[in-house]
Amino acid sequence: MAQQTDLHGGGAPPAPAAVPDIPVLDNAVWTSLDGPHARFAERVGSAARYPADVYAFAALADPADPAAWADLRTLVGAGAVVRIKPVHKVPDGWEVVGGGQGVQLVDTSLRAEPAPEAVRLGLDDVPEILDLVARTGPGPFLKRTVELGTYLGIRDRGRLIAMAGERIHPPGWTEISAVCTDPAHRGRGLATRLVRAVAAGIRARGDTPFLHAAADNLPAIRLYESIGFTLRRRSTILAVRSPGTPRETVVRTS
């Protein structure tokens, strides 16, 4: 019998009926890896994932297809833990080891504009980015996440105090992510300016911005709605362990 999870988030309202159907965003990690981000994809058949130091998520072409789960097992190996969305139940042999609820918001009336004070961030800035992420907790950011798209930051006396950038990239859409501000500099509208600036770059190449947030992060959801994003859908995020026992390394002493 398939294992099912019923995880409820902290109070985000259901998506408004006025939001149009956007199938490419229903399984955004997959459509990104199967499309514009195919160069990052580690893939076996109907399963794919980003490299572990880029974005720690996997995806299935069809989460209801047992063959896709078999491909994922081949991809990740035995006894491996992987994060995946949107999934509500897993096949026999797979174990749910964690999870939560997220929301997806899409740009419907955002005013996008450059931020003259923003600077482009790159690989040389990663140590400083990781320090800011550790202090602010905007969500997953790894050593190579900056390679996924344009990341912009604002500095104060040379120190990085706010940032935002691009993460997954389904066809025609780009996710804005890693939006964060040093606690000592909040209340100045830095995050909003960076979101608008990142969105301006996304729009300039013909894409539409969207973003994700934890379902219980109501202040962030309200902020995004206030500047022109519309809540579209909720989704379940799971951490699952693949069937089997990891093969132990044999250490030879002679």
Image (cartoon, rainbow, N blue to C red):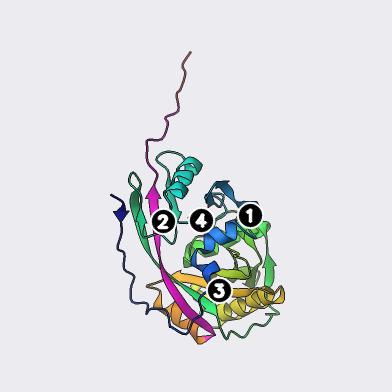
Q: Which mark is residue 38?
A: 1
**Of callouts 4 and 1, which one flags the residue occurring earlier in the amino acid sequence?**
1
Residue drawn 71% across and 80% down? 116
Of all residues, the one furthest to the left in this rendering is 1
Asked if residue 237 lies in the magenta stretch, the reply is yes
Residues at marks 3 and 2, CA–CA distance in whole angstroms: 25 Å
Identity of the amino acid at label 2? Ala
**Cα–Cα gap, marks 2 and 1:** 22 Å
* Residue at mark 1 to residue at mark 3: CA–CA distance: 19 Å
Residue 166: give x, y in percent of width and height: 61, 67
Which quadrant of the structure image shows residue 145? Answer: bottom right
Q: Is residue 13 magenta?
A: no
Q: Where residue 146 sits: x, y (%)?
A: 62, 60
Residue 161 visible from this viewpoint: no
> Which residue ends up furthest to the top in the rendered image?
254
Query: Measuring 58% from the left and 84% from the top, which residue is drawn there?
Result: 110
Element marked by disc 4 = loop
Position above or below: 209 against 57: below
Identity of the amino acid at label 3? Phe
Mark drawn on residue 210: 3
Residue numbers of the magenta segment = 227-249
Q: Earlier in the sequence, mark 1 or mark 3?
A: 1
Q: How far separated are the C-alphas under marks 2 and 4?
A: 9 Å
Residue at 69% over, 68% down: 120
Residue for badge 4: 61
Which numbered marker is on residue 64?
Answer: 2
Q: Classify 10 Å Cα crowding around label 3: few (below 14), some (14-19), many (20 and above).
A: many
> Residue 117 in the image: x percent, y percent?
68, 78
- On the image, the x and y values in percent for residue 147 come to 65, 58
As measured in the structure, the alpha-carbon distance from the residue carrying label 4 to the one carrying label 3 is 21 Å
Cα separation between marks 4 and 1: 13 Å
